[in-house]
Image (cartoon, rainbow, N blue to C red):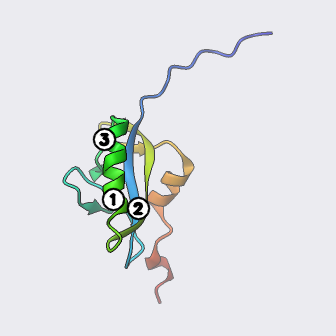
Amino acid sequence: MPRAPHKEPQVQVQVITANLLREGHVVWLTPDATWSRDLAAAHCFDDAEVAEAALAAAVAETGTVVGAYLAPMRPTPDGPEPIHFREAFRCAGPSPRAFQT
């Protein structure tokens, strides 16, 4: 039986994402611990312990964001790039603005 070709492991980092409590927009935690709607501004964590500590702080921001979690990303020169469909979809929308009349 032929063996599948060996794939090099992909380099991954993690970012913290959440939704703004009032507006519902998808946001990303930045290096200065603020929230941005621009994924390119997200802080990329390459240390799991540091990422977990930052996530705990983000989860505690109950008056600002909801649903904070770590999302794996592929680092690129232009900023993090989603690896999974969920994050790619969240970057593109849907947005609460689409439902405003």
Between residues 4 and 34, which one lies in front from this camera angle? 34
Per the image, the residue denoted by label 3 is 50
Q: Residues within 10 Å of mark 1 (few under 14, many from 20)?
A: many
- Dot 1: what SS? helix
The kind of residue tagged 1 is Ala
Q: Which residue, given by chain and number where applicable, does mark 2 sit on?
A: 18
Residue assigned mark 1 = 58
Query: Given contact means CB atoms under 8 Å apart, are the residues at marks 1 and 2 in contact?
Result: yes
Looking at the rendered structure, the kind of residue marked 2 is: Ala
Residue 38 seen in render: no
Which mark lies nearer to you, 1 or 2? 1
The residue lying toward the viewer, choosing from 18 and 100, is 18
Type of the residue with mark 3: Val
Q: Residue furthest left?
A: 32
Q: Secondary structure at mark 3?
A: helix
In the picture as drawn, the residue positioned furthest to the bottom comes out as 101
Q: Note whether 59 is above or below 21 in the view shown.
A: above
- Image side of residue 79 versus residue 74, left or right: left
Q: Percent position (x, y) of residue 101?
A: 47, 90
98 relative to 69, above or below: below
Residue 44's quadrant in the figure?
Answer: top left
Whole-Å distance between the Cαs marked 1 and 2?
A: 9 Å
Q: Residue at 39% x, 42% y: name it.
A: 14
Is the residue 80 above or below the residue 12 in the image? below
